[in-house]
Image: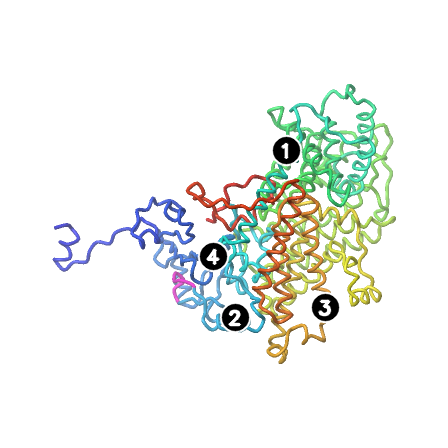
């Protein structure tokens, strides 16, 4: 008789065993290897792999078939050490902050339930008992209400199965491809169109025709990337320079655009080196390839503005390749001011030319700032040993540029900036022109009035807003900051004050800044508005009174960005739009800016994409609000019930259509992926179907297939080959394949992502 049977026969309770296997393996009675996730769950592609809570932490996971997908709730147990206060708060109706992970094919989404909120008394779709360790579930009344909304709006959802609680509680993080992102990452904006997100989730799960076409497009993308690699012998720099006339155009394009905002090089010195390079084809006068590498990076950035199709992308990628080889060839850290200039140029060239993962850009910017600190760029030259005025000003300019790159990469990657205002004391550069700092000029630099436009005016104007933008980047990308709308509004107030001051200073400059410079500043400031307020967009539909300001600010910002990034002038064949244009002319577009957002990546792709998602969310909100305010919604289509706000709806719908054209133009410009084009097409199809009173799902499916077919045709032309259907079945070698992530990983970084992400 074993011990348990003996204790049972004596009337004693059996000794409880500690469960080591995961919950799915225990349910299926399989041997578990205790990994996270275990091998059995990995093979079955189950996202419900979880273990019973231990050491005061309770973890409960619901199967993916239930509403909300696989869901894990973490909360402190009242019996755990140090949890006396938590237990007392729970008994008094106070709930600690809880984090709920919701798993799906596309990503893992972290929803945070703020402390002090009792979910079941707030009218939310979450219901909690008096002990915060029990499972959070969807309230049946709210589910029934959502079903009624879907019926009346023909499937246009207000929340998604990927993140079913996003309209009530904030999303604190997203895990994609084993990488953790904060809500400032571009992937969060896809949750603003839940109807398209759910359609995509269903298609990825079914592995039907849509998925097959995506695999076909991935094969074509690999062919295109392979064809762009030019033959090159490492160590031979400057062998792929274009004709002199083309190079001149690229060189001037760089100085006209990025160098006028982010000061990196000394313009007269760079132009002298450029002339020497062309006068001596053998480069005999140059003792080092460093100058050639730096000049080629200027050409790589300028190539983005050469034409509408970015025809020089292969050459630009080659120049980036040579720069990367040069920086790494010495085997040691290149830590001079000249090398840091090259690093800054390489950073910008990657953003405008090459696809890179956001976390890679974030990591490279971190290395850049530490290299800069190693040579003292973070200290003001006045506090260092005496140096020439040219060197002192170039150090100030370079440090200000590095700070901008660090902040940009932080918002892009959804990660903290890892920098504090206490870490540097370098002041902003002086308001001077480069010719006044020429090394041959031994006299003192002249003084310029702040309203006089110089080569550093744009950098100084943006630099004055750095402090508030750094505070926002640290706040929105912090894991310890409580979600507080009051704190968000406080930071927003400071941001808008700096924004108004920036606009005022730009308009006071004489001569006036170019359209590109003004629109670049708009992009920089607008992304911080999105970073603060876009997380409240899903909740503004449920609680419009509390989040009205956030919704209005996001929509106004999105309209302003879209007006010059997606010019409506291309849709003037519509008689109504033409009449609107005659009354109030649309924003005239800047060719340099349009080519940047069409051919570039990083923020030049993600910020216009976010603006389009906000526009789609506003259209969806108007449709749902009309359901509550119009008695005609049940008997006639939406587009026949709108009279009062019809002009606003036409504007929003036109911008969303332009955004779809923009995503297609990006594919035609060499962006070898179809994800944005397909997703934006599906978003538009669902909204248009709901407005016309037809089922949204059928329209999304039809338009999604059309977009994929058109995208594959474009990629096949670029690859110079016919598109072969992808029919490779999943085998044992694909155990780690997470099929859904294919959509978001195809070609976005330009890397061969054969092993796709597995959330968690």
Residue under label 1: 371
Question: Can residue 523 be seen by looking at this rendering?
Answer: yes
Indicate the secondary structure of the residue bearing disc 3. Answer: helix
Residue under label 2: 146
What residue is rendered at 68% in x and 59% in y? 493
What is the basis of the colouring in this image?
A: rainbow
First in sequence: mark 1 or mark 3?
1
Indicate the secondary structure of the residue bearing disc 4. Answer: strand
Above or below: residue 189 compared with residue 42: below
First in sequence: mark 4 or mark 2?
4
Spatial separation of the CA atoms under disc 4 and disc 3:
35 Å
Above or below: residue 20 compared with residue 226: below
User: Are discs 4 and 3 less than 8 Å apart at CB?
Assistant: no
Give the number of the mark in front: 1 or 3.
Answer: 3
Spatial separation of the CA atoms under disc 4 and disc 2:
19 Å
Quarter of the image holding residue 572? Answer: bottom right
User: Are discs 2 and 1 less than 8 Å apart at CB?
Assistant: no
Nearer to me, 487 or 542: 542
What residue is rendered at 78% in x and 20% in y? 285
Q: Which mark is residue 358?
A: none
What residue is rendered at 68% in x and 51% in y? 664
Q: Where is residue 348 in the image (x, y as percent from the top left)?
A: 69, 40
Spatial separation of the CA atoms under disc 1 and disc 4:
39 Å
Indicate the secondary structure of the residue bearing disc 2. Answer: helix
Quarter of the image holding residue 236? Answer: top right
Residue under label 3: 648
Spatial separation of the CA atoms under disc 2 and disc 1:
53 Å
């Amino acid at each position: 008789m074993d011990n348990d049977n003996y204790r049972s026969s004596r009337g004693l309770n059996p000794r409880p065993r500690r469960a080591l296997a995961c919950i799915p393996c225990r349910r299926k009675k399989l041997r578990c290897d205790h990994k996270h996730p275990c091998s059995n769950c990995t093979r079955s592609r189950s996202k419900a792999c979880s273990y019973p809570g231990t050491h005061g932490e309770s973890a409960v996971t619901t199967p993916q078939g239930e509403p909300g997908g696989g869901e894990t709730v973490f909360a402190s147990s009242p019996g755990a050490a140090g949890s006396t206060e938590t237990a007392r708060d729970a008994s008094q109706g106070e709930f600690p902050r809880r984090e709920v992970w919701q798993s799906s094919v596309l990503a893992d989404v972290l929803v945070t339930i703020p402390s002090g909120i009792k979910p079941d008394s707030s009218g939310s779709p979450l219901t909690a008992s008096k002990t915060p360790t029990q499972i959070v579930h969807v309230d049946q009344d709210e589910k029934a209400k959502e079903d009624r909304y879907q019926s009346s709006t023909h499937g246009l959802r207000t929340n998604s199965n990927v993140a079913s609680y996003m309209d009530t509680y904030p999303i604190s993080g997203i895990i994609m491809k084993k990488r953790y992102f904060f809500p400032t990452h571009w992937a969060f904006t896809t949750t603003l169109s839940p109807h398209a997100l759910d359609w995509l989730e269903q298609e990825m799960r079914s592995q039907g025709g849509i998925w097959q076409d995506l695999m076909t497009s991935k094969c074509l993308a690999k062919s295109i990337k392979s064809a762009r690699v030019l033959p090159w012998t490492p160590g031979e720099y400057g062998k792929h320079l274009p004709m002199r006339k083309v190079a001149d155009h690229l060189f001037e394009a760089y100085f006209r655009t990025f160098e006028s905002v982010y000061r990196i090089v000394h313009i007269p010195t760079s132009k002298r080196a450029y002339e020497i390079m062309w006068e001596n084809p053998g480069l005999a006068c140059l003792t080092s390839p460093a100058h050639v590498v730096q000049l080629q990076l200027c050409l790589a950035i300028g190539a983005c503005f050469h034409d509408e199709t970015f025809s020089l992308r292969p050459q630009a990628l080659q120049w980036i390749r040579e720069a990367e080889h040069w920086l790494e060839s010495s085997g040691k850290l290149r830590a001079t001011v000249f090398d840091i200039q090259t690093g800054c140029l390489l950073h910008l060239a990657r953003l405008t030319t090459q696809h890179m993962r956001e976390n890679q850009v974030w990591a490279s910017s971190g290395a850049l700032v530490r290299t800069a600190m190693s040579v003292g760029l973070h200290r003001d030259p006045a506090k260092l040993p005496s140096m020439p005025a040219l060197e002192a000003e170039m150090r100030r300019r370079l440090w200000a540029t590095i700070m901008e790159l660090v902040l940009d990469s932080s918002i892009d990657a959804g990660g903290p900036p890892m920098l504090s205002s206490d870490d540097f004391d370098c002041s902003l550069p002086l308001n001077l022109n480069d010719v006044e700092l020429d090394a041959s000029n031994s006299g003192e630099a002249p003084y310029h009035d702040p309203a006089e436009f110089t080569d550093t005016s744009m950098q100084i104007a943006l630099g004055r807003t750095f402090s508030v933008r750094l505070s926002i980047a640290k706040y929105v990308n912090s894991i310890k900051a409580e979600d507080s709308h009051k704190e968000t509004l406080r930071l927003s107030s400071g941001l808008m004050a700096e924004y108004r001051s920036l606009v005022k200073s730009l308009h006071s400059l004489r001569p006036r800044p170019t359209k590109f410079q003004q629109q670049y500043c708009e992009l920089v400031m607008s992304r911080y508005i999105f970073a603060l307020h876009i997380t409240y967009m899903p909740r503004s539909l449920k609680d419009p009174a509390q989040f009205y300001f956030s919704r209005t600010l996001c929509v106004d910002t999105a309209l302003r960005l879209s007006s010059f990034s997606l010019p409506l002038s291309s849709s003037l064949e519509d008689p109504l739009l033409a009449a609107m244009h005659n009354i109030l002319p649309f924003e005239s577009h800047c060719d340099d800016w349009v080519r940047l957002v069409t051919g570039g990546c990083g923020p030049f792709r993600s910020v216009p994409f976010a603006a389009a998602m906000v526009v789609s969310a506003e259209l969806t909100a108007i449709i749902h609000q009309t359901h509550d305010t119009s008695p005609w919604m049940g008997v006639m289509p939406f587009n026949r019930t709108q009279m009062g706000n019809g002009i606003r709806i036409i504007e929003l719908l036109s911008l969303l259509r332009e955004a779809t054209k923009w995503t297609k133009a990006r594919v035609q410009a060499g962006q070898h992926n179809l994800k944005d084009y397909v997703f934006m097409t599906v978003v538009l199809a669902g909204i248009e179907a709901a407005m016309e009173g037809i089922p949204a799902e059928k329209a999304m499916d039809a338009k999604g297939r059309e977009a994929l077919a058109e995208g594959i045709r474009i990629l096949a032309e670029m690859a110079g080959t016919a598109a072969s259907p992808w029919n490779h079945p999943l085998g044992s070698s694909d155990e780690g394949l997470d099929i859904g992530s294919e959509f978001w990983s195809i070609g976005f970084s330009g890397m061969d992502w054969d092993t796709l992400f597995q959330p968690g």
